[in-house]
Amino acid sequence: MSDVTEMSATALGQGIERGDIDPVALTQAFLDKIAAHPMANRIYARVTPDRALAEAAAAKARADAGQRRSPLDGVPVSWKDLFDTAGIATEAGSKLLEGRVPDADAPVLRTATAMGLVCLGKTHMSELAFSGLGLNPMTATSPCINDHAAVAGGSSSGAAASVAFGLAAAAIGSDTGGSVRIPSCWNGLVGLKTTSGRISLDGAVPLAAGFDTVGPLCQSVDDAAQVFAALEGRAAPDLQGASLKGRRFARLTTIVLDDLRPEPARAYAEALDRLAAAGAEIVDLGVPEIAIPMADAGILFTTEAWATWGEAIDANPDAMFAPIRERFEAGRNTSGADYIRAKNRMAAARQAYAKASAGFDAVLCPTAPILPPNAEKLLEGGSYYVTENLLALRNTRVGNVMGLCALTLPTGVPSCGLTLMAAPNTEDRLLRLGKAAEEALRQPLHLAQ
């Protein structure tokens, strides 16, 4: 059954529905592949074979009785190591939380389990989720599928690697400033950033609660729609017949096109050509107000992060990789007044953005302006680490500070993604657009001539 580990989550669910795939044998195939994989220890923080096989056996019984709970009932997935798992360590990539074992599953995990998703284990991540790179010398640095010497992107680094290397059918991660979308981009996956507050964060180790979100990393938009629905305990949106004809997209010109490296720039230009060839209208859109909360990011994100973790960090500073610790410490001295002023400026910018983008189906930008950097060079720290981390997070952060939902799609150029951003709580509509865009991005470029 080695080939089943390369199938999409949707296809696996369909195979289970037809009776062609046994959920127990499927789960065992993934567990065997994980056990044999030379980089599995850099991808999974811990594997949960007993839980996985028990859940798979229950899924098989439901399938045999014609009582499957969802289209993904019996499909094995991975979970980022910040979602609480009962009786299984949840350490959020940090030595500060070493040995932390929750008593109960996070509500989102309980919901997904009730929908039949099988938990293979917990994946490595950036320390306390505070990096877009995925470099973690304190626990493990997950590899990028397109360059094993490069970082996978963060903070959901192991989540992306688990899917890209065929060690999970899909993965669940979190996104505070790009932590689902960056690793999805760099590993050729689809990643969905959900609207803040839409999926419960209870039982998820926090970074900045005002921006933290839960989202899937998948092989396709179909998979993302199905996993997203399972996380909410509902039916997935219908993506059939999705088309770009008559759709109107904004090409964001503020900030996100600055300092684009050559490969992301080429991939973005070709992606827009493909969308236009499929019938989409693409119009340039500048929203200068975005620059204000983007400049305030150091106040908005680090202040929340320091408020949550400052005492623990001060008590054991050597337990953290210095560049990560320094990012947290940047929030130490922010005054309450400065923080509130920054929040107010962000609220005003969100209003301006909503007004400017109201006439468009989605707003487009390159997911990341850079390719995944070399892990060894990043370990040297200094200005290179800081510059690459800030650039990695820059474009995705727009979606967080503007309070949007966002979807990154592979462009066909390795480690280069196209992002579609839409108004809050319009994920189902965004996924339908994403399905049409995904099909357009797979077409030969000559069709855009």
Image: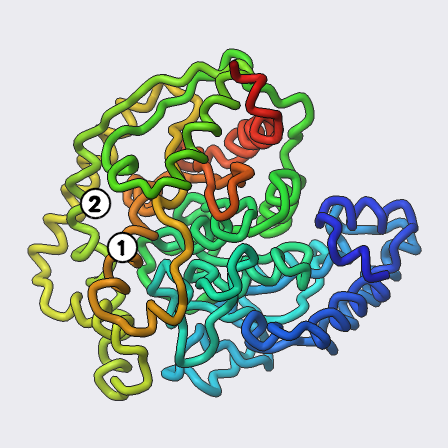
On screen, residue 280 above or below 122:
above
Give the x, y percent position of residue 107. Answer: 55, 62
Q: Residue at x 51, y 11 (%)?
A: 246
Give the x, y percent position of residue 304. Answer: 24, 62
Numbered disc total: 2
| The quarter of the displayed image where residue 122 is located | bottom right
Q: Which sits in the foreground, 297 or 354?
A: 297
Q: Amino acid at mark 2?
A: Met
Q: Amino acid at mark 1?
A: Leu
On residue 294, which mark appears? 2
66 on left or right of 248: right
On screen, residue 89 above or below 77:
below
Q: Which residue is mark 1?
A: 390
> Label 1 neighbourhood size at 10 Å, few (<14), some (14-19), many (20+)?
some
On screen, residue 343 above or below 423:
below
Q: Residue at x 57, y 64 (%)?
A: 79
Q: Residue at x 55, y 79 (%)?
A: 103
| The quarter of the displayed image where residue 176 is located | bottom left
On screen, residue 410 above or below 254:
below
Element assignment for label 2: helix
Q: Which sits in the foreground, 316 or 387?
A: 387
Q: Which sits in the foreground, 47 or 337?
A: 47
Q: Which sits in the foreground, 372 or 213?
A: 372
- Single out the mark in the foreground, 1 or 2: 1
Give the Cα distance between marks 1 and 2.
11 Å
Give the x, y percent position of residue 263. Answer: 41, 41
Q: Residue at x 54, y 32 (%)?
A: 434
Q: Considering only order in the chain, which callout, 2 or 1, is on the residue closer to the N terminus?
A: 2
Look at the image and tell me whether residue 304 can be seen.
no
> Label 2 neighbourhood size at 10 Å, few (<14), some (14-19), many (20+)?
many
